[in-house]
Image (cartoon, helix red, strand yellow):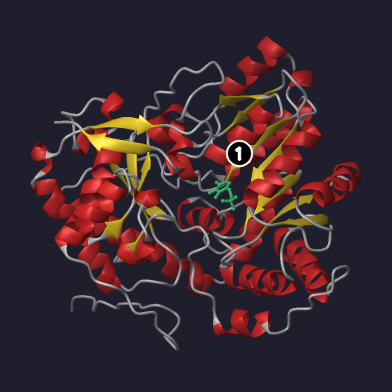
Amino acid sequence: MEKRKRSWAEPYKMKMVELLKMTTLAQRKKALQEAGYNTFLIHSDDVYIDLLTDSGTSAMSDRQWAGMMLGDEAYAGSRNFFHLEKVVQEVYGYSYLVPTHQGRGAENILSRILIRKGDIIPGNMYFTTTRLHQELAGGKFEDIIIDEAHDPENEFPFKGNVDLSKLEKLINKYGAARIPYVSIATSVNMAGGQPISMANLKELRAFTKKHKIRIIHDMTRVAENAFFIQQKEKGYDKKSIREIVREINSYTDGATMSAKKDALVNIGGFLAVNDWDIFEEARNMVVVYEGLHTYGGLAGRDMEAMAIGIEESVSKDHIKARVGQVLYLGNKMLNYGIPIVKPIGGHGVFVNAKKFLPHIPQENFPAQALAAELYLDAGVRTMERGIVSAGRKPNGENYFPKLELVRFTIPRRVYTQAHMDVIAESAAIVYDRRKKIKGLKMVYEPKYLRFFQAKFEKLQ
Ligand SMILES: *Cc1c(COP(=O)(O)O)cnc(C)c1O
């Protein structure tokens, strides 16, 4: 007898719903024009399904909301801080915690402490805010991710891996003393949510130890990375997500965290380190930029929700459904023939705009144009991850990234499978009329992180 199919569904049910607003094509046209063809500038009231980001957009659980009521809003020594500290030590394994309002707050403090002018910071692909803080602190980012990561068609399962020969070249060129740390992201966002393997991390640890270079972990999506290790890496299928997360972190010296992703909260982040001296300086500096070291720009209730969210983020049922939903959408889009980054990543589906719109040259912003068209069709909001996001080098020249992508980022525990169907169908309709889509020109460009506020006009 043929094996019967067994579906699985979300490991939660709904207790409260948020009503969505439907819009007409005429309304969306107007909204898009007013937003200068930048999906970041569209009012969320004009959006039907919001896949702009998975950052701070997750649905909290009833336990997290209950935790909010246990907020201890004391200025100093809030009990929620001590709860969070304990969870960070137990689940993540780092010794010392400095809370910050979100990930970039931690990046700012860490970069100021560790980077001296002229330093080199190698990393497995840049991230927008991470690299900017490295540059503002006087450092220079160097990409050491494996070449496969820059090829959207390559199906290598661990495209987040570091190419050790690239790191070795940097050490030979600049000397290890000018490399304060290697910046390692799990679930590499800009590569399409691609994981790094445990084997690669272990090798990197051994190599950096030899040269006395620290590894700082951007652990924003470490649980999602752990899921791919469990599914795809030899020797890890019997290990729990919790165990894998601890092992990943054990090969690193400290971490910056945007808790708005993995950790299922709407705001929050932290810096966590094992080195007392770095901690001491960070604890001091956080007072200048964020708030006292036992709240770092957060309310007590935010820290409580984060502590509970971290525990939920490493549960097997959660992570399977979370990544499972992304895979469901990705496979559906593949069935429609839409060119997406493969393998499908952990937090979203990344459409290859260069292949979707081969007639639009990169300087006319194909991914930005595609995100605008996708919004127009059914009110699905995505975002550009290409030349606009890459911005300019410190010398003013544009970066021309190999990857020109539109990101369909899935918020955690927010949308249903039916929403995924609607999204894929809308993308397929836009794909059918792709030849008629035109490029854009930039008419306003902010100095920093231009993708957030830049404005465009349609080319005729
Ligand atoms: C979101 C993000 C950050 C920055 O965190 P914020 O909370 O948005 O400040 C850093 N690194 C990665 C990989 C991220 O996805």
Q: Nearer the viewer, residue 365 or 348?
A: 365
Residue 66 position in % (x across, y down): 64, 85
Residue 218 position in % (x across, y down): 63, 46
Please state if 47 lies on the left or on the right of 214 as rendered: left
Residue 293 position in % (x across, y down): 84, 57
Please state if 71 lies on the left or on the right of 449 as rendered: right
How many numbered circles does the render carry? 1
Task: Please report the residue visible at 29 percent of the width from the left and 55 percent of the height from the top.
Answer: 330
Q: Looking at mark 1, is its residue's CB closer than 8 Å to ligand 1?
A: yes
In this figure, which residue is indicated by the disc labeled 1?
130
Task: Please report the residue visible at 75 percent of the width from the left and 21 percent of the height from the top.
Answer: 117
Residue closest to the far bottom: 15
**Amino acid type for the residue under numbered disc 1:** Thr
Task: Please report the residue visible at 58 percent of the width from the left and 63 percent of the height from the top.
Answer: 241
> Would you identify the image quadrant in which residue 400 lies?
top left
Residue 222 position in % (x across, y down): 58, 54
Please state if 222 lies on the left or on the right of 443 as rendered: right
Secondary element under disc 1, as helix, strand or loop, is helix
